[in-house]
Amino acid sequence: MNRSKLYIAAPLLGLAAMALRRGMYTLYTDVQGLLIPGNPLALLLPAVTLLAMVLLSLAREPELQAAPRLSAYSNWILALGLLLPQQRAACVAPLLWGIFQLTRYLSCAALVILGFFRARGKKDSLCLNALVCIGFIARLVASYQVWSRMPQMQNYVFSLLAVILLAAFAYQQAAKEVCLGSPLWRLRFGLWGTFACLGASVGATDQPFYLFAALWLMGCTLFDSRKAE
């Protein structure tokens, strides 16, 4: 088994998770919009998730040539995703929402600058990657105020997993700039995060953001402008 090609499982299994979740919400909901317990798709989804976690944990970094422009584009794509309109839910405290909004725009600016660094083949800035990580942590805290009030865990479990993995990947990006972190865990967080983001793009309140995030993870994981160094 060529473990350097297992990264392909991330988008493929992510698309499978999207299809299963779409089928659940289309075919197996009651009059209140809640999922019917024990439906076959809900039983199949954990199996696909487990398969993704196992296969992607075995993956090795693919032997690809450095692609600075593709890496740059992936940062700009996520910056666009962060600019998508966000509405504050009543359960989110105004102060917390303000912190989230501030970190969201700072993360967006950081990603734009990182994209220019990548396009020119320059070294990333630790503080910029750290800003992106902080932005994901703020999103996690603010979003959980909403998720914790949802009537069923299936509505937010993929979103929760996706944001945790996004923050972990961004942390590894920052740690890499000071020769810390782990290239293997960076790869795993990137591939796991791609799968989770694709799954979260169905049934989440901010579905388009997760599609942009999945593209960012794949771009940074596979087309890092400094891979060839």
Image (cartoon, rainbow, N blue to C red):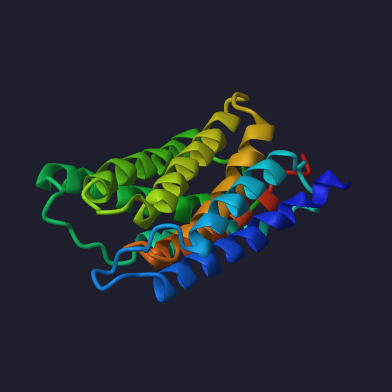
Residue positioned most to the front: 38
- Please determine whether, in this image, residue 134 is positioned above or below residue 70: above
Please name whichever residue, 42 or 16, is drawn nearer the observer in this view of the structure. Answer: 42
Q: Quadrant of the C terminus?
A: top right
Residue 173: x, y in percent? 55, 38
Q: Quadrant of residue 86?
A: bottom left
Examine the image and state in which quarter residue 207 appears: bottom left
Instruction: Please indicate whether residue 141 sits to the left or right of residue 118 in the image.
Output: left
The residue nearer to you, when weighing 98 against 144, is 144
State the residue lying farthest toward the right.
1
Residue 115: % across, % down: 54, 55
Residue 55 pos. (x, y %): 71, 45
On screen, 73 above or below 47? below
The foreground one among 40 and 94 is 40
Residue 185: % across, % down:
63, 33
Residue at image location 28% in from the left, 40% down from the top: 141
Is residue 97 visible from the viewing direction of this image?
yes
The quarter holding residue 205 reads: bottom left
Residue lying at 50% horizontally and 40% vertically, measured from the top left = 170
Q: Nearer the viewer, residue 8 or 150?
A: 150
Which residue shows up at 77% across the image and 50% down it?
Answer: 6
Q: Is residue 181 above or below residue 11?
A: above
Q: Report the label total.
A: 0
Left or right: residue 189 compared with residue 138: right
Please say whether residue 75 is visible from this viewpoint.
no
